[in-house]
């Protein structure tokens, strides 16, 4: 019996021998001139250039392919139509016989963003192949790779013997040109003039002897400089192929009787396309064109099914190529092209406001319905870095029936126990979850075998979700993958492949619900904890943009109800969609390249400015009507706060979700300041804070509750070395948190401002070349101690944290999540608890023991370490990869310490957090005519996440969220109808009162 190496050689010989003809295409039109390959020119990374020419493909019974060896990627257009891609893994492309106009739209960026600031094409050629032998050889090589991983010795031996018996008589030996052409086709750099960027995993690597022969003799043979060895006769070769095909079919049939198929795999072609990552948004648009045109061609040829998320991508496609967009619409109608996710993009789902998460589905699902006549049923977030426990409720109320993901397989300490399960959210909503073993599988027997071996829930849910195709940088499937799919069901002892259709897959997964285990709470992914912190500016402007969009909608809605303005629906929707794009799971987390943030941050600033213009215009109109200066409050409870207006401070009151006249309250007793030798004491009606000369908090006495809030010195700023092993911007190493260096005091704490309404202490600290300036503030009547922080950071590979030690005795702490609250352990007894050494929170974390607690509030810093009563807020992370400039330079943020009675709800932590996120606004009328009437739209302790115009233009949408573990009732300003979150289904009249279950989100339509 032959060994595996001999079997592999026979298969490669058959494959190389199937290559019969080639023709170099040297001359091309470029910028109005004729150029000859090889060609090279300097180019900016985001350049697109066009090469074109006429070609004629013979109609001689061979299958002809276009091979282009180049740096970067190219969209191939054939006769003016997008046809496919040439990239690192789509290394050649079939061309039908006849005369054609051929265009290459070339980008210097490779699939993963590598570039050399140039356009370079080494060669282009047409290659003619005998198709049936070529595909047969691919099948044989797939079986060779399969044998290498088979654990069952009897199956391995039986399959090797069958292949040995079939191939031992093969006499075909390719010549040098055929060997060289095979290497050129399968991999870039066939003539040794281009290095490989990434390896292909859907085809087997060429043998080392082939590599040597093509590298040493290939150029000479191809150019006629050396004499080649004879090429095998075609007639003899074809007889061998017929025999091998027949014997292989018989052999696999025999083996399947002994080693039957196991399980099933729903096969969906797929391409995970990051909206931005190691390339900017502009390149993603080109990736979509290249990927979708490849999918369309293969779908037309093979009838595959393809699954693709992200409504944004389809909108881009419609703008860029209407012809291709119409083809996609046709395939969606036929059920072959499956719309997935239901979101605008595959966003982060931990660091965005709950309303942002709702809008991802609202705009995504409604776009799908408008353009394609249907919404997505499969939730699709394979690569997001953790999943909030509110997500099941939001998905289910947005039309999603099942959820598919992958990232939980990346857990670094604890293997996630299930691959198919019921996910139960904090409100009790349940949704079935199916974990893919990969979201970029290769459609090989080896891949199917290994995935089934790994898959945990074979008995409860006896099938895989098998997404195959190149991803992250796009690309999708190759023709080899699709050809191999036909072969997979003949291979023994691997899952049976069925073509994935949405309705069939969803129905079968839901039919298994009764068998599935249940997982309650968040899906915490034990990697990429640094993404809660990396890129300060991105996260700050995102939080600000979410806040002003909410305010713009609320005031526009109320003003329109009062007949004062017309609601700017189209303008606000466009602003929202820009924000949703920048919430993509590699953009908001800080793990993209510099060019992405140059664009995203600039755009978020524009969004904020444009939303502020809307707010200002509307509030001015209201103030004009009222004839007085007004204070506006967009939260649904009364507020009494010290507000800064044009550099002056005022103590103001405002009614719930409304306004009243600007009438500053006289401060009878002000904030007291006392300086002693080594400390400064700030005191108001609620708190007494003692700050040492290093700006550290050595005491925080809660006067209302007669309790010291600190166990030991707090607000200790520590610089931790931050050099994770691989994922620089993404990860944090726990060992580095245990060690750290306190920042040095450059300017000792001193009082820089004092008035009856506010006192401010300034302290300046340093580390290396970096400076951190803090303004510690206490306002009259406030229980919030503020730490306004300005950084000028100049040091790389540092994680900056502020550490606190609160005077509580807690086994767990509570954290704000999008439209929810999650309880996490503060102890480290189990490996699962130990793995949560850094966790995300949206706006606050509360260390409480039930009777008393202390919260940290920060709207743009999201990473927390909590060990018993000690808690650290991550302030800044300055990685090198993939953006060496990340968090360098100036930045600012504010965090707050808030001691309180009871838990987070009794202590109203959520209210204080929303108040610092959405501040009171003061608008001056042009002239004061009369005393303004106080106005309140509604009053509730629930969170009003949104008040906006309904999507159908009839009435308004009120989004209510219950932030507590108890149910309570909300009185509505008008009669209401409950809707689903995407405003497609009426769920029933609720009258003027609506009951909210614990952590429930309700969407109410009012007139």
Image: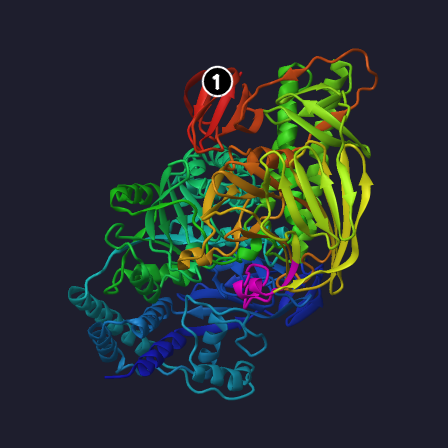
Q: Position of residue 423 (x, y in %)?
A: 37, 44
Choose top left, top right, bottom left or bottom right for residue 53: bottom right
* Image label count: 1
Q: Report the side of 718 relative to 291 (left or right).
A: right
Instruction: Name the residue rendered at 74%, 21% in the picture.
Output: 630
Q: Nearer the viewer, residue 388 or 866?
A: 866
Residue 404 image point, x, y percent: 40, 48
Q: Quadrant of residue 436?
A: bottom left
Give the left or right position of residue 770, taking residue 531 as reference: right
User: Image point 78% across, 48% down: which residue?
Assistant: 676
Taking depth in this image into account, of 363 and 799 the one nearest to the observer is 799
Q: How busy is the neighbourhood of tag 1: few (under 14 within 10 Å), some, or many (20 plus)?
A: many
Residue at 26% from the left image edge and 52% from the top image edge: 462
Viewed as shown, does residue 231 lie left or right of 917? Answer: left
Question: Is residue 723 located in the magenta-colored stretch of the structure?
Answer: yes
Helix, strand or loop under label 1: strand
Q: Nearer the viewer, residue 86 or 648?
A: 648
Residue farthest toward the right in the current orientation of the protein: 927
Q: Does residue 133 belong to the magenta stretch?
A: no
| Depth check, front residue: 279 or 529 | 529
Q: Could you say which quadrant of the image residue 896 lies in?
A: top right
**Residue 852: % across, % down:** 52, 39
Residue 59 seen in the figure? yes
Q: Which residues are magenta?
A: 718-739
Which residue is the site of mark 1?
A: 976
User: In the rendered view, does 439 fall on the left or right side of 897?
Assistant: left
Residue 322 makes an appearance in the image: no
């Amino acid at each position: 019996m032959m060994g595996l190496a001999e079997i592999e050689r026979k298969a490669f010989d058959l494959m190389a021998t199937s290559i019969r003809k080639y023709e170099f295409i040297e001359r091309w039109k470029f910028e109005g001139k004729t150029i000859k390959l090889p060609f090279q020119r300097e180019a900016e990374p985001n350049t697109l250039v066009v090469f074109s020419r006429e070609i004629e493909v013979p109609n001689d019974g061979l299958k002809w392919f276009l091979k282009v060896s180049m740096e970067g990627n190219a969209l191939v257009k054939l006769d003016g139509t997008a046809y496919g891609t040439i990239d690192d893994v789509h290394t050649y492309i079939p061309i039908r016989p006849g005369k054609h106009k051929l265009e290459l739209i070339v980008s210097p960026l490779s699939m993963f963003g590598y570039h050399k600031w140039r356009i370079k094409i080494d060669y282009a050629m047409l290659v003619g192949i005998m198709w049936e032998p070529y595909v047969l050889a691919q099948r044989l090589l797939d079986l060779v790779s399969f044998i290498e991983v088979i654990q069952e010795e009897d199956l391995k031996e039986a399959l090797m013997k069958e292949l040995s018996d079939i191939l031992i008589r093969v006499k075909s030996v390719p010549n040098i040109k055929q060997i060289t052409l095979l290497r050129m086709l399968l991999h870039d750099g066939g003539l040794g003039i281009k290095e490989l960027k990434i390896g292909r995993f859907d085809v087997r690597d060429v043998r080392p002897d082939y590599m040597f022969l093509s590298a040493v003799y290939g150029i000479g043979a191809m150019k006629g400089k050396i004499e080649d060895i004879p090429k095998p006769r075609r007639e003899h070769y074809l007889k061998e192929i017929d025999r091998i095909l027949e014997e292989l079919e018989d052999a696999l049939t025999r083996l399947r009787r002994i080693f039957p198929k196991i399980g099933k795999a729903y096969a969906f072609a797929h391409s995970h396309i990051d909206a931005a990552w190691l390339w900017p948004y502009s390149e993603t648009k080109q990736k979509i064109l290249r990927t979708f045109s490849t999918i369309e061609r293969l779908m037309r040829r093979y009838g595959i099914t393809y699954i693709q998320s992200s409504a944004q991508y389809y909108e881009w496609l419609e703008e860029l190529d209407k012809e291709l967009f119409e083809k996609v619409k046709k395939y969606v109608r036929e059920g072959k092209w499956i719309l997935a996710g239901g979101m605008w993009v595959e966003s982060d789902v931990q660091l965005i406001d709950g309303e942002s998460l709702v809008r991802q589905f609202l705009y995504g699902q409604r776009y799908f319905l408008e353009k394609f006549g249907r919404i997505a049923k499969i939730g699709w977030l394979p690569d997001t870095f953790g999943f909030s426990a509110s997500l099941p409720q939001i998905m289910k109320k947005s039309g999603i029936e099942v959820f598919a993901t992958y990232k939980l397989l990346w857990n670094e300490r604890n293997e996630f126990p299930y691959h198919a399960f019921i996910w139960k959210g904090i409100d009790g909503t349940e949704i079935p979850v199916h974990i893919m073993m990969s979201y970029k599988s290769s459609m090989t027997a080896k891949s199917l075998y290994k995935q089934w071996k790994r898959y945990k829930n074979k008995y409860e849910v006896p099938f895989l979700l098998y997404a195959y195709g190149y991803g992250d940088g796009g690309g999708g499937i190759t023709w080899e993958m699709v050809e191999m799919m036909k072969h997979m069901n003949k291979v023994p002892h691997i899952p049976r492949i069925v073509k994935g259709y949405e309705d069939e897959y969803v129905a079968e997964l839901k039919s298994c619900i009764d068998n599935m285990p249940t997982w309650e709470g968040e899906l915490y992914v034990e990697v990429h904890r640094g993404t809660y912190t990396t890129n300060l500016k991105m996260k700050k402007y995102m939080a600000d943009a979410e806040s002003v969009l909410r305010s713009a909608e609320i005031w526009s809605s109320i003003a329109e109800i009062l007949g004062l303005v017309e609601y700017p629906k189209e303008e606000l929707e466009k602003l929202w969609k820009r924000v949703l794009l920048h919430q993509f799971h590699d953009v908001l987390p800080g793990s993209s390249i510099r060019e992405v943030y140059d664009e995203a941050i600039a755009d978020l600033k524009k969004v904020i400015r444009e939303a502020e213009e809307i707010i200002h215009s509307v509030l001015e109109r209201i103030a004009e009507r009222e004839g007085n200066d007004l204070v506006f409050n967009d939260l649904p409870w009364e507020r009494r706060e010290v507000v800064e207006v044009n550099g002056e401070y005022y103590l103001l009151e405002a009614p719930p979700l409304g306004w009243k006249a600007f009438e500053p309250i006289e401060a009878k007793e002000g904030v007291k300041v006392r300086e002693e030798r080594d400390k400064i004491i700030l005191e108001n009606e609620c708190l007494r804070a003692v700050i040492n000369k290093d700006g550290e908090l050595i005491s925080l006495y809660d006067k209302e509750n007669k309790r010291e809030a600190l166990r030991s010195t707090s607000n200790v700023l520590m610089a931790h070395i931050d050099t994770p092993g691989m994922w620089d911007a993404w990860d944090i190493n726990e060992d580095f948190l245990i060690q750290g260096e306190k920042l040095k005091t450059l300017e000792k704490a001193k009082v820089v401002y004092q008035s009856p309404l506010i006192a401010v202490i300034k302290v300046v600290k340093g580390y290396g070349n970096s400076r951190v300036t803090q303004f510690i503030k206490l306002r009259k009547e406030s229980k919030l101690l503020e730490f306004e922080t300005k950084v000028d950071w100049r040091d790389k590979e540092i994680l900056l944290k502020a550490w606190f030690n609160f005077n509580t005795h807690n086994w767990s702490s509570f954290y704000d999540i999008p439209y929810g609250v999650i309880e996490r352990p503060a102890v480290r007894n189990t490996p699962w608890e130990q793995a949560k050494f850094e966790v995300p929170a949206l706006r606050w974390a509360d260390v409480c023991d039930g009777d008393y607690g202390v919260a940290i509030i920060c709207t743009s810093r999201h990473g927390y370490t909590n060990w018993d009563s000690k808690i650290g807020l991550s302030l800044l992370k300055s990685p090198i990869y993939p953006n060496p400039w990340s968090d360098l330079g100036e930045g600012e943020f504010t965090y707050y310490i808030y001691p309180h009675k009871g838990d987070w709800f009794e202590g109203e932590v959520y209210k204080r957090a929303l108040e610092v996120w959405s501040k009171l606004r003061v608008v001056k009328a042009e002239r004061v005519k009369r005393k303004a009437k106080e106005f309140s739209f509604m009053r509730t302790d629930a969170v009003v996440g949104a008040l906006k115009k309904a999507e159908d233009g009839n009435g308004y949408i009120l989004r209510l969220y219950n932030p507590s573990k108890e149910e309570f009732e909300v009185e509505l300003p008008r009669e209401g109808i409950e809707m689903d979150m995407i405003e497609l289904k009426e769920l029933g009249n609720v009258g003027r009162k609506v009951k909210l279950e614990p952590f429930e989100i309700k969407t109410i339509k009012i007139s």
